Image (tube, rainbow, N blue to C red):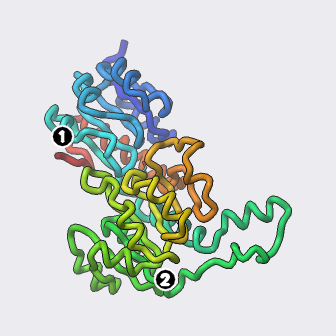
Amino acid sequence: MNGKPKVLVTARLHEDAMNSLRNLAEVTTLARQLAASKSTLLEIIHDFKGVIIGSLEPFDKEVIYAGDKLRVISRHGVGYNNVDVKAATQKKIYVTITPVLSETVADLTLGLIISVARRIPQAHKYVNEGKWGVETGFFTGTDIYGKTLGIIGLGRIGSAVAKRAKGFAMTILYYDLIRNLEMEKQLGLKYVSLESLLSQADIVTIHVPLTDKTMRLVGERELKRMKPTAYLINTSRGPTVDESALYTAIKDGWIAGAGLDVFSEEPINPKNPLLSLKNIIYTPHIASATQECRYKMSMMSVENTIRVLKRKKPLHYVTS
Ligand code: DGY
């Protein structure tokens, strides 16, 4: 038996990160699907001093309190809505994050905006099915250049999206709890109320963390305020949008369509009615999934863990 601290890894980490973790800890890996089950976590958690997890593993109060030896819950990512930070803080367990993914998530956000407005995935499928041409009219999309973008949440990711949108000569509106005068000056952004953002924007994009206050932030009332020609983009967390209202909004033409990387239930239920709509495109929560970004996330999630195990402050952590 060796005396190394035990660390459970349920996120998919780069081999370099795994190797540096193994130098210091006895590492157990568990597939994310299994770790998404609370009963599995409850059975095994008491053994571990550290965990490195994805966005689905439910680290609620019960699981955290069952982790007698737990010193660090290291999120391989920035969203921590699956961790009860208050319970962790009470137990003096660090909850760490990896804020190195903003540019990568912003890239995918722009990808979704262009894809939904120009119907790129649907056009790809069309050609793949042996068809050709713009005769359906459906493939006559809408311009992005020069349009109005509404950013809900001007944090790290929202700001990275704003910088990109400048290249498309967009008018950029934003809504946040906190005004960012520096970004307003630097990029010419306009701070507006949520209501006026929704009614003016051609594209509305959500970049808020999931909290009690942002749960279903965009519901029926908000969708009805949007232009019938507008698109909704979500790369934050699924539950920030009321999915059944979104379904009706697209089906009944309150808005023109949506581009989604996140859903209220993940993995998505194949029977989710959103999947049956034509004017919607979706990806399986891959906004941070590039080689470069996942490498940085892997290294930082391990670095955060190692630091705590060595009784040092982690690089990035959150408290309640
Ligand atoms: C995040 O960082 O929270 C992303 O959604 C990946 O988990």
* The residue positioned farthest toward the right in the image shown: 130
* Residue 269 against residue 282 in the figure, above or below: above
Query: Which labelled disc corresponds to residue 86?
Result: 1
Residue 292 visible, this angle: yes
Q: Which residue is drawn at 29% across and 56% down?
A: 214
Q: Which mark sits nearer the N-terminus, 2 or 1?
A: 1
**Residue neighbourhood size for the residue with mark 1, other residues' Cα within 10 Å, grouped as few (<14), some (14–19), many (≥20):** some
Number of numbered discs overlaid on the protein picture: 2
Query: Which labelled disc corresponds to residue 166?
Result: none
* Residue 32 against residue 304 in the figure, above or below: above
Q: Which residue is drawn at 69% across and 64% down?
A: 122
- Quadrant assignment for the N terminus: top left
Residue 4 visible, this angle: no
- Tell me the kind of residue under disc 2: Gly
Residue tagged by mark 2? 167
Q: Is residue 253 left or right of residue 123?
A: left
Q: Which residue is drawn at 40% across and 57% down?
A: 241
Mark 2–mark 1 CB contact (< 8 Å): no
Q: In this view, does 301 lie to the left or right of 265?
A: left
- Tell me the kind of residue under disc 1: Lys
